[in-house]
Amino acid sequence: MRKFLKNQRGQSLIELSVAVGLTSMALLAIVSLVLVGIMTQKRSANYYTAVNLAREAIEIARNTRDSNWLKIEAEQGAPTTNWDDNLYQFDIYSAVLHFDSGNFFPETQSRFLFKFIDTRGMNEATLAQIKTIYKKTLSNPLVSIYTNSIENFCSGCEATSFKRLVYLKPICDGTGPNVPASLDKCERDASSRHFYCDNGGLCTSDAPKIGIRAIVEVNWQEAGRNSGLKLVDDIYNWR
């Protein structure tokens, strides 16, 4: 009888240990799933923000071209405006978006304007600082403004993990009869035959500027890893 009770107690202890082990494994699995879900949700939110930051830059470039078109029409045959005004600075095409809370820029129909920066020879630390996106939450906590520059902006801006750089590369027509075989600091596309210029490259009278290739690069830190995306869109002077 005593031996039977002793065996029964031993079996109960083993069953309890097994039950505790299974419960611990189940709880660990649940916690892991919850953590994975939180991380996935955060990654999705970061990717969504990055996509919007890239699209924003593309739309402002389009708005700038459209605003220039309207100015040209208003100038009635004696235009002083070019369709690509405010979309380049001399031979510099790399830019960040500058927000100014005190000014409304008619060029872009917004408070954003491209601020062109020559990135040639710039060290990585300086470039990273210039590309950094700052965030300002407005009185409505659901509305935030993202900007690469805090000049004339506001107090209380906080740096985010996002970085954005915009390239507004000239597209030079490469289909004309006297088009040169090459242009300095420009690459020629094999299919379209057009030239796409980097900083320092210029279109010519034989290869005139017909559009802009907008390239927006957005990078961010996520769980100690670097993530990024690139959005490319060709904006033509088709009028």
Image: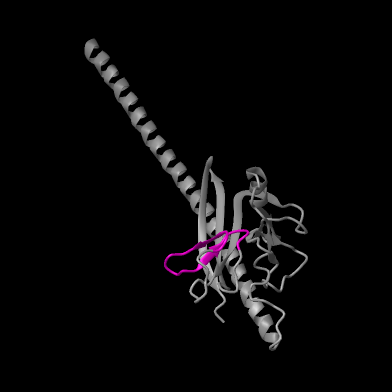
Q: Is residue 77 left or right of residue 29?
A: right
Q: Is residue 183 in view from this perspective?
A: yes
Magenta stretch, main secondary structure, is: loop
Which of the 4 quarters of the picture holds residue 5? top left
Q: Residue at x 63, y 44 (%)?
A: 124
Front residue (pair 223, 172): 172
Number of dots carrying numbers: 0
Q: Is residue 97 left or right of residue 233?
A: right
Image quarter of residue 1: top left
Q: Is residue 200 magenta?
A: yes
* Residue at far bottom of view: 76
Color theme of the render:
one colour
Q: Which quadrant of the rendered structure holds the C terminus?
A: bottom right
Is residue 41 one of those drawn in magenta?
Answer: no
Q: At which x and y percent is residue 173?
A: 53, 72
- Does residue 1 appear in this view? no
The relative height of residue 219 versus residue 152 in the rendered view (above or below) is above
User: Which of the pair 167/140 is nearer the observer?
Assistant: 167
Name the residue at 43% across, 65% down.
190
Q: Which residues are magenta?
A: 183-201
**147 in relation to 223, above or below:** below
Seen at 42% across and 67% down, the residue is: 191
- Relative vertical location of residue 156 with respect to residue 35 in this rendering, above or below: below
Residue 181: x, y in percent? 50, 66
Q: Residue at x 64, y 51 (%)?
A: 120
